[in-house]
Image: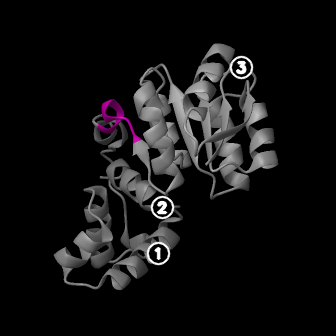
Amino acid sequence: MKIVIVDDDCLVTGALKTILEANEDVDVVATGLDGRDAVRLYGEHKPDVLLMDIRMKNMNGLEAATEILYAYPEANILLLTTFLDDEYIVKALRIGAKGYLLKQDYASILPALRAVCSGQTVFGMEIVSKIPDLIRNEDGFDYAAHGINEREKKIIRLIADGNSNKEIAAELYLSEGTVRNYLSSILNKLQLRDRTQVAVFYYQHK
C-alpha cells in the first residue's frame, strides 16, 4: 500500500511515517508540507491513499483535495485534522474525500487507510454522529425534475440509511444487479460519484 503524507507539522509527518512503516505492507513513498505539495506528489506517485492534513498554509487540504479529485476522480484521500470543525466535515463530504479522522486518534489511522484502499469510506465515530444534523436542509428537492422516479427515491433513502445493495435488493424484492443498475442511473442523473455522496445528497435535501 503506497501512501503519501502531507502535513505542515514535520513532527506529525515523521510520527505518522514511523507508525505506518512499522507495518510491512505500508510504504510511505513521499511526504509534503502543504496543499501544493499534495497536488504535485499525487501526480508524481499516484499513491493508493493520500493522507493529508486540512489546515495548512498556502493551500489547505480541502483545496488540494478538490484539485486532485478534479484531475483524478479515482483518488483516495483521507483527511486528518485536530479540529472537529462542522464546516470542514461538510466540505470533505461534498468534494468526495474518502475519510475524515481526528489526528489525535492514531490507532484508527492504519485501519482507516486499509479500508479506504479497499474502496470503503471512513469517518470517525465523532464525525458520523454529526453528519445528519450538519447537512440536513429544510428546502425540498424536486427529484422528478432530475428524472428520479419513486423506486429510485426509495433506493436513495435506503442507501442513506446505510443499507448495502444486498439489503436493498431484499427490501425491494429486486436482484442485486438491478439495484446496481438503479444506483448507476441515480449517480448519473444527480451527477454524483458514489453511494456516500448519494447519502450526503439525501440528507442535504431532506
The residue at which mark 2 appears reads as 194
- Report, in whole angstroms, how far the alpha carbon at label 2 lies from the one at label 3: 30 Å
Q: Amino acid at mark 2?
A: Asp
Judge by depth and name the residue closer to the eye, 196 or 22: 22
How far across and down, in percent of the image, does residue 135 sit? 37, 41
The residue at which mark 1 appears reads as 184
Find residue 170 and report its image quarter: bottom left
- Above or below: residue 54 compared with residue 66: above
Mark 2 or mark 3, earlier in chain:
3
- Above or below: residue 129 compared with residue 143: above
> Residue at coordinates 73% horizontally, 54% vertically from top-left?
71
Judge by depth and name the residue closer to the eye, 116 or 177: 116
- Classify mark 2: residues with Cα within 10 Å, few (<14), some (14-19) or many (20+): some
The residue at which mark 3 appears reads as 57
How far across and down, in percent of the image, does residue 12 sit? 60, 18
Query: Which secondary structure lies at badge 3?
Result: loop
> Residue at coordinates 33% horizontally, 39% vertically from top-left?
131
